[in-house]
Image: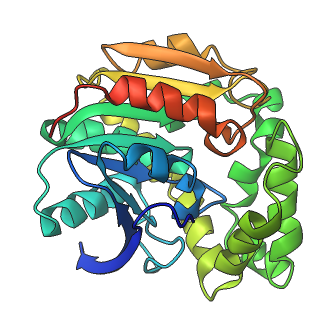
């Protein structure tokens, strides 16, 4: 990721699976949860900036990267419990939690299921699962076609096998303001990750938990997240900031919300505009002392 910080790799068995995470820095814990189609490599620009002030922990989610890819357990409550168990293994009781995309869904469920463990929450370029399900129409279905395709049993794995590079190139080009933003070694790192045995299946299993995720979200739809919440998104992404009223969406999810639209960024603002995102994160995290 970078040679300017002391980044260490670890594996811990927690909640019944072997979890991989990277760590850097000292101080109050800040946890970074990546999204699709990424791994914890997504945070390579944030870790050095945040590790100057905090103990930064960036896991690979269940089904992704170097973490186990079991056949089940991809509903967001179980994935949130993965994180809770990991934190218990590390003797961490409370964190500042940052999630992007699928990681934001895990982070949102974590904040509702384990409110005592979250001091503040950051969600990046994410429309909550329940909101997407409630709003879906022909226009949204076209933008979220992959939500539907990835839920088809077995077929995605069959069609993607041997073509992981083309599959990933589509998403990174289509979802970024600059189609070449994710290229070179960063792109190759993701290709290697998704060429690994079980990696595509793990990501598909994440999407196939959609019905359970929606049911879980409906159960406590009227419960607002109490932790101060920062919602940010890429101003140029057609499927999030340009399709939904993100400020109102997140005001309906959390009691205390600050919002930012990141200019010249699509779905991956933390990768496309890291300096802007890092500045916003550092400002929002100020005062977090663990």
Front-most of residues 148 and 175: 175
Residue 89, given in percent of the width and then of the height, sits at 15, 69
The structure's colour scheme is: rainbow
Indicate whether 8 appears above or below 139: below
| Residue drawn at (56%, 64%) of the image | 2
Query: Is residue 126 toward the left or the right of residue 56 in the image?
Result: right
Residue 287, given in percent of the width and then of the height, sits at 23, 26
| Residue drawn at (34%, 78%) of the image | 10
Q: Could you say which quadrant of the image residue 205 lies in?
A: bottom right
Residue 130, given in percent of the width and then of the height, sits at 50, 33
Q: Residue furthest front?
A: 4
| Residue drawn at (30%, 14%) of the image | 255
Query: Is residue 155 toward the left or the right of residue 281 in the image?
Result: right
Decide if residue 231 is in sight here.
yes
Count of marks placed on residues: 0
Instruction: Check the picture and name the quadrant holding the N terminus.
Output: bottom right
Query: Is residue 288 toward the left or the right of residue 261 in the image?
Result: left
Residue 148, given in percent of the width and then of the height, sits at 72, 52
Decide if residue 16 is in sight here.
no
| Residue drawn at (43%, 80%) of the image | 68
Indicate whether 271 appears above or below 230: below
Front-most of residues 78 and 45: 45
Instruction: Check the picture and name the quadrant holding the C terminus.
Output: top left
Query: Is residue 72 toward the left or the right of residue 53 in the image?
Result: right
Indicate whether 57 appears above or below 49: below
């Amino acid at each position: 990721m970078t040679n300017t910080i002391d980044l260490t790799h670890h594996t811990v068995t927690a909640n019944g699976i072997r979890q991989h995470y990277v760590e850097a820095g000292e101080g109050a814990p800040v946890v970074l949860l990546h999204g699709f189609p990424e791994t914890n490599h997504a945070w390579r620009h944030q870790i050095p900036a945040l590790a100057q002030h905090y103990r930064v922990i960036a896991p690979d989610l269940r089904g992704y990267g170097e973490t186990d890819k079991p056949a089940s357990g991809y509903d967001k409550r179980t994935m949130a419990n993965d994180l809770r168990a990991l934190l218990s293994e590390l003797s961490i009781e409370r964190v500042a939690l940052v999630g992007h995309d699928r990681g934001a869904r895990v982070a949102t469920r974590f904040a509702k299921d384990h409110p005592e463990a979250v001091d503040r929450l950051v969600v990046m370029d994410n429309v909550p699962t329940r909101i997407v399900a409630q709003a879906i129409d022909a226009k949204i279905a076209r933008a979220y076609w992959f939500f539907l395709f990835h839920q088809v049993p077995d077929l995605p794995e069959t069609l993607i096998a041997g073509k992981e590079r083309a599959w990933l190139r589509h998403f990174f080009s289509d979802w970024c303001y600059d189609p070449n933003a994710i290229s070179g070694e960063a792109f190759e790192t993701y290709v290697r990750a998704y060429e690994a045995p079980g990696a595509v299946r793990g990501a598909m299993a994440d999407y196939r938990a959609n019905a359970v995720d929606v049911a879980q979200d409906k159960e406590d739809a009227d419960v607002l997240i109490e932790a101060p919440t920062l919602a940010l998104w890429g101003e140029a992404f057609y499927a999030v900031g340009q399709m939904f009223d993100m400020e109102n969406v997140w005001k309906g999810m959390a009691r205390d919300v600050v919002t930012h639209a990141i200019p010249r960024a699509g779905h991956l603002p933390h990768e496309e505009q890291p300096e802007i995102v890092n500045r916003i994160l550092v400002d929002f995290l100020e005062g977090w002392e663990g």
